Image (cartoon, grey):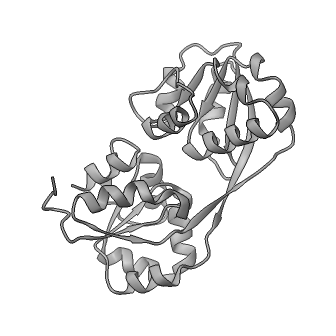
Amino acid sequence: MIHESLKGQRVVVTRPRDQVEAIAAELRAQGAVPILFPTIRIVPVEAAGLQAALAELDRFDWIVFTSGNSVTCLCDLAERYGAGARMTGRRIAAIGRGTADRLAQRGIRASMLPETSAAAALAAALGDVGGARVLFPRSQRGLDILPAELVRRGATVTELVVYDTVTAELDQTGLAELRRGVDVVTVASPSALEGFLELLGDEAREILSRARLACIGPTTAAAAERLGLRVDVVAAKQTATGLVAALT
């Protein structure tokens, strides 16, 4: 059923080009007009220690994922080096439903999912990690909050960079649509917001002064506020469905 509050609203989607369809479809179903303007792209990284970590997957007590991108990149790398089968049967924590869904697409079930999609909630949900060995696949630019908290609680954390986030090339079609006017700008990560500002410069802030800013979760909202931006909507569930539900 179309929600009247979104009918005809022009909503900017800043996710990487290969990840826009889920939220675009949700927006269309609600009568909104998605404006596709990718601001970042994901680049897989084969960091030092990758093959050693994949060979020792059985020795880790937990593998902790804080994004769908880390799931995709680690699983792809594991398959490449013949360690894909070792991913199943592990105790795996996912920060939110979107990350758990990405795991499920790979045939992997999340053993633990916190009620709130936040680093502090994930650390608390893991409980007593004293002496535990934790593998933490991450972005090159990811925050250090979660691994630092796990170390404070007594865990031994192996951080493994599996991807980087870089600014996308300017999409001229999307830019033309932006300049026709938009009602909402959605961002699903701090890096997506930073990419929006980098691609458009002063024009980005002009657009955001006239449109609502919708963030997929508290981490992204906090990053926006640190940049001096007004946040209008924060999704309770960090998925495409959760973000569109927050908008409605």
Give the percent coordinates (x, y) of residue 145.
60, 39
Can residue 209 be seen here? The reply is yes
Q: Which image quarter: residue 22?
A: bottom left
Can residue 140 be seen here? The reply is no
Which residue is at the front of the view, 65 or 232? Answer: 65
Q: Which image quarter: residue 164?
A: bottom right
What residue do we see at 61% from left, 19% from top? Answer: 91
What residue do we see at 62% from left, 63% from top? Answer: 41
Give the percent coordinates (x, y) of residue 216.
40, 51
Residue 183 relative to residue 35: left or right: left
What residue do we see at 68% from left, 17% from top? Answer: 61
Residue 7 relative to residue 186: left or right: left
Is the residue 121 above or below the residue 233 in the image?
Answer: above
Which residue is at the front of the view, 47 or 193? Answer: 47
Give the percent coordinates (x, y) of residue 104.
51, 32
Is the residue 154 above or below the residue 220 in the image?
Answer: above
The C terminus lies in quadrant:
bottom left
Q: Which image quarter: residue 73?
A: top right
What residue do we see at 47% from left, 48% from top? Answer: 219
Which residue is at the front of the view, 225 or 76? Answer: 76
Which residue is at the front of the view, 126 or 178? Answer: 178
Is the residue 158 above or below the residue 132 in the image?
Answer: below
Give the percent coordinates (x, y) of residue 150.
63, 26
Which residue in the rendered view is the most extreme toward the left? 4
